[in-house]
Amino acid sequence: MATSLAHDTPLARDSLMARIWSWVTTTDHKRIGVLYGVTAFLLFLLGGLEALFIRLQLASSGNTLVSAEAYNELFTMHGTTMVFMAVMPLSAAFFNFVIPLQIGARDVAFPRLNAFSYWVFLLGSLFMNASFLVGAAPNAGWFGYANLTATQYSPGLNIDFWVLGLQILGIASIAAGINFIATIVNMRAPGLRMMRLPVFTWMALVTQFIIVTAFPVITVALVFLMFDRFFGTNFYSVAAGGDVLLWQHLFWLFGHPEVYILILPAMGIISDVIPTFSRKPLFGYAVVVYSGLLIGILGWGVWAHHMFQVGLGPVADSVFAATTMLIAVPTGVKIFNWIATMWGGKIRFTTAMLFAVGFIAMFIIGGLSGVMHSSPPADLQQTDTYFVVAHFHYVLFGGAMLGIFSGIYYWWPKVTGRLLSEPIGKTHFWLTIIGSNLTFFPMHFIGLLGMPRRIYTYDAALGLDTMNLVATVGAFIMGLGALVFLFNVWYSRKRGAVAGDNPWGGATLEWAIPSPPPVYNFTAIPEVRSRLPLWSKDGMTPLPETPREDIHVPGGSFWPVLAAVGIVLMAIGALIKVLPVVFGGGVLLIVSVYAWAFEPFEV
Amino acid sequence: MAWAAGALLATTLVVSACGGDYPQSTLDPSADFGERIDALYRTIFWWALGVFVVVEAALLFVILRYRERPGLAEPKHVHGSTLLEVAWTLAPAIVLVFIAVPTIRTIFETDGTPDAGALEIEVIGHQWWWEFRYPEFGITTANEMHVPRGRPVALSMTSADVIHSFWVPRLGGKRDVIPRRTTRLAFTPDSVGEFLGQCAEFCGTSHANMRFRFMVDGEDEFVAWVAQQQAPPVAAEALTGLAREGAELFANPAKLCFGCHMVDGVSPGVLGPNLTHVGSRSMIASGILPNTREGLARWIRDPVGEKPGSLMPKVPLTEQEIAALVAYLQSLE
């Protein structure tokens, strides 16, 4: 399927089936980015809906809206969904769409592997959520501590869905991670040295290295658990001499780097947004890049701060307290550099910029409460309470999600060719800021005043009804904000102002090409001579109006989809314990990968 | 948004300042362990608040001062400053030293090493209740721990099933209770009273219902409590009427009670709480129902309805039989 100029988008006269087929088989990084974005946002809404049920249940003491069993499923799936199926793939949507454009490439290094990642992610998410349909959603927390997950204590399908679903999602993440490392390292335009990369692409690169190193760790932990549950091994079996703390070490050895997988892409986004709207280059570019690298590296040495309450002993506690506090330094440095970037600038408060500034303001709070429980004695009072819930929602909602919204408003015109409405966007922003602070700020006090996490009911005697009600009201204000955003999307599609190539006056390569970009991205691969090619005189070679010759871009392929189906079939077979289905899935996977390897890619 | 957060901080601080109404508050400690943590937390809090004010104020200043408006000059393209980078790398590092030093001191002060003469108590976590054993006195009880004021307490803890976490917020930090391991907590309660505790590590369906009470008694009350717990249970022969009927039901294998619950000299069960002196407790079912005739009857009528997932099944009993069992349990003081 040679694709040249004439065929860059499906034509209106193409039948609906043909257009659907072109999306299913697409290997275009931009379309895969859109697929990631839409899928992950729907899952974000689902995770948000689960959160609203949690908040409704906790709106008053002794509430009986949902049962204990349902509540445990809701908070488990809320965490699992937001971490693995919403925030990570929303970041992946930006990686897909933006990275090749920022580095002056026509696509990612392995376009079909990229499609494979998406389909594995989609089918894995459907697999995990299908657990609701059979009334057996995972219910041991997103952290799934052994030995509660053992067959003895969790006999149903709930944990089977979880242990298999997370392995599937891990495959998608690792494949994408390798793909983006190869892309960023190898496919930069001439002259685009590493220290000229936009900070978003830099942070994405750091994130990919964390993904390909951290996900194998949780995969090992999950394989152990799967073997315990399916084949009767004893990795975490107390009766047979296994150790339940093995799970915690493996899980948090993955789990803390995972926090940086969630936050670094958002830090990258706002590091691109803030300079654009301050009309100033990023202050201390090299320091921001190196501090991101340092966060990525230090993130490996802090996992046991999730385990202070298990009693690791005073020496281990002291060491992990010190490493955890150390991470505040590069994080603080980033915040100071963002503020210094705005200092002396001429700040345009577009919605994207508001979300970026909101990120900084909220992240400071999350960072400081993080320092509070980096201190093990203080943590012994705060861990497993709502204080920690407040902390990581300031980091992951106030940080990661506000950063992602900033990125959505920033790159939306590049993706669709139309702007999102600014007045509607600002309404969305203020509802989100007010709602999230109303929800998460009182949780600091709810926790310090003694309310543990993960409880479906609490006693009126704790005196926490009012604050919990405030948190619930805030959650619904956030939900209203999300509806306003959806309206903005609809409005933009119908009446959005046409964006043009560079609506914000951005400095990086993606703003040098039309919105939406043609399938081949660049009419000619530019030579880059500056970190800010569009702001510098002679920062890049000019792009011709039209390509000088036919450009070959990757054709479509159905094999990645079939390979993904094979993987999920294997999981379904394991779930229902029908061996032929497992083998069938395996055969489909092998055949698909084989056919994919021998499929002519460019004709 | 910075000021919005600041206003929220202020209002909520005011709300939280009026203590007393929060029986699980970590900010109102009543033992040396909790007091050390509280002092450390307050140190960290003021440092954090200082940093919060400085950084959010800088952010607020910048976004107000440099917002786009007529007459604002086109920005100069500054790329960075080594001096500033060094300064704001060192500044947080210095603040962290002021947090790290008292932190490490407190870690070693609160590491669970008991003081001399401590009262040893064994804690065993169960889905979803607490077993407490006093080797010094040969007592086994459930969900209500009694200690005398002023005597150091040393807890050695383990779990019979999954991981739980022992937490009495007003006495100090939590410690996980882990199968096949023994974890320790040590503290000295300094005032008489009833303190609420709760499992803090998610442990399955009724994690929310795994509560307990920590009673700090005066010296005399504690001695009396120990004597009462050491006494043999009331003999069935000494009972009359409804309670006598209940005693017989309790001993009847068809009614399942004695397979799981121990009453010293009467039944051997160890899966559920020891009921030898259940009548002396203020609450039942790990702190979710009052130990009254109504509370006991509700519990026996439908344990799983009261505590979802409860391992105690719903035993088919007539209302008359329930009333008899309640009368017997209330006689076990």
Image: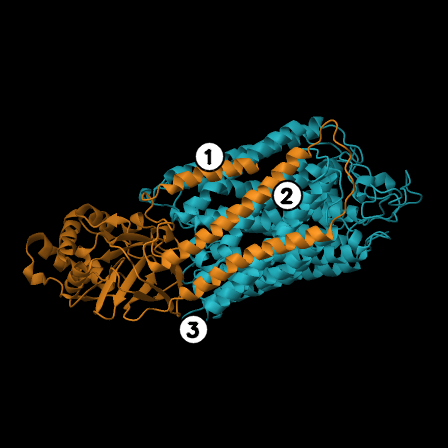
Chain colours: A cyan, B orange
Depth check: give the residue in front, B98 or A384: B98
Quick check: can you spot residue A43?
Answer: no
Depth check: give the residue in front, B312 or A238: A238
Q: Mark 2 vs mark 3: which is more N-terminal?
A: 3
User: Residue type at mark 1?
Assistant: Val
Q: Is residue B36 above or below residue A24?
A: below
Determine whether, in the image, residue A123 is placed left or right of residue A229: right
Depth check: give the residue in front, A360 or A303: A360
Quick check: can you spot residue A102?
Answer: yes
Q: Is residue A516 above or below residue A262?
A: above
Question: Which quadrant of the figure has residue A497?
Answer: top right
Q: Which residue is mark 3?
A: A240
* Alpha carbons under labels 2 and 3: distance apart: 47 Å
Residue furthest to the bottom in view is A241
Disc 2 with disc 3 on a shared chain: yes
Q: Which residue is mark 1?
A: A473
Badge 3 density bin: few <14, some 14–19, many ≥20, Cα 10 Å: few
* Alpha carbons under labels 1 and 3: distance apart: 48 Å
Q: At 13% across and 52% down in the image, what residue appears? A: B327
Determine whether, in the image, residue B297 is placed left or right of residue A408: left
The image shows residue B91 at horizontal and vertical percentages of 61, 53
- Of circles 1 and 3, the one toward us is 1
Question: Which quadrant of the figure has residue A469?
Answer: top left
Mark 3 secondary-structure assignment: loop
The image shows residue A79 at horizontal and vertical percentages of 52, 49
Q: At 21% across and 60% down in the image, what residue appears? A: B257
Mark 2 secondary-structure assignment: helix
The chain letter under disc 3 is A
The chain letter under disc 2 is A
Q: Which residue is mark 2?
A: A403
